Amino acid sequence: MSRSVAPTIAFMLALALGGMPSAPSIADEPTPEEAWIPLFNGTDLEGWTPKFAGSDAGDNFKNTFQVVDGLLTVSYDDYEDFDNRFGHLISDQSFSKYRLRAEYRFVGDQCPGGPGWAIRNNGLMLHSQPAASMDRDQDFPVSIEVQLLGGADEGERPTANLCTPGTHVVMDGELLTRHCTDSSSDTYRGDRWVTVEIEVRGGEVIRHLVDGKLVLEYEKPQLDPDDPDARRLIEGDDLVLTAGHIAIQAESHPTQFRSIEVLPLD
């Protein structure tokens, strides 16, 4: 995140929009590091819009999202109680075909009043609706969530799982309607840094990788017509999501991101 954005960022981000042929699979060939574009400037939240349940888009409730020492930080220092103020930091830019790479870690203790399932829990939301389109009291944007989890002292708890707020996907040829599906990743305990990478092929295939290992794959991300938030976004008969915004969650546990980068696929 401390790296400056190259002058060609607008052109390269534009390549992430649909309408171009697919590139080779993420595992096929290495990618030059200079091709990755940092999505944060290491100084502020320019290019992103916060949205919290109970607040209007643009209100960074209690300064939850901060950039501290070059790290994008989800902080609860100003909270006395979480009070179900689920938050998301949503990119102003929309993406379709790209790779997303993030280094994250969980730190400190959960905010008082946070739900038990949200301990060491965050997420990278793909194909998200824009912040301005969310209802004031909406908890989560309609999106495909790459769920980031930290392990407890004992037991298994994989990361880079799939959750589907207002959406469905197809897996192994069948429509998957359950809310969350575990990946095959290892369990990562403590405050260690973890690298997650996601390959997104528009409305086709999405792959999750952790430390370079494929841990989950599915296809045809689509709106759930039975979800009230998703119904507001449906246009015509086609439910498949081919593009959308990227979002970072704030679900009550302090989290830091050392880098969040995108590689447009053309």
Image (cartoon, rainbow, N blue to C red):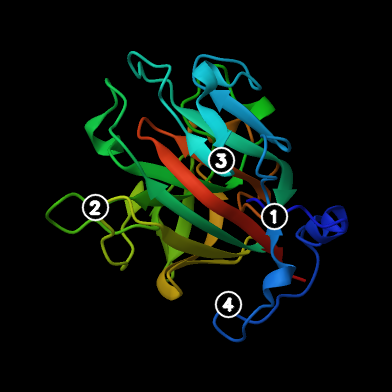
Amino acid under disc 1? Arg
The amino acid beneath tag 2 is Gly
Question: How far, Cα to Cα, is label 1 from label 2?
Answer: 30 Å
| Mark 4 surroundings within 10 Å by alpha-carbon count, few (fewer than 14), some (14 through 19), many (20 or more) | some
Q: Which residue position holds label 4?
A: 26
- The residue that disc 1 covers is 3
Determine the CA span between mark 4 and mark 3. 31 Å
- Which residue is located at x 65 percent, y 44 percent? 42
Camera-side mark, 2 or 3:
3
Where is residue 229 drawn, in percent x and y? 53, 30
Q: Which residue is mark 3?
A: 69
Residue 205 figure quarter:
bottom right
Picture residue at 66% right of the left edge, 78% below the top: 31
Residue 151 is labelled as: 2
**SS under mark 2:** loop
Q: Nearer the viewer, residue 247 or 68?
A: 68
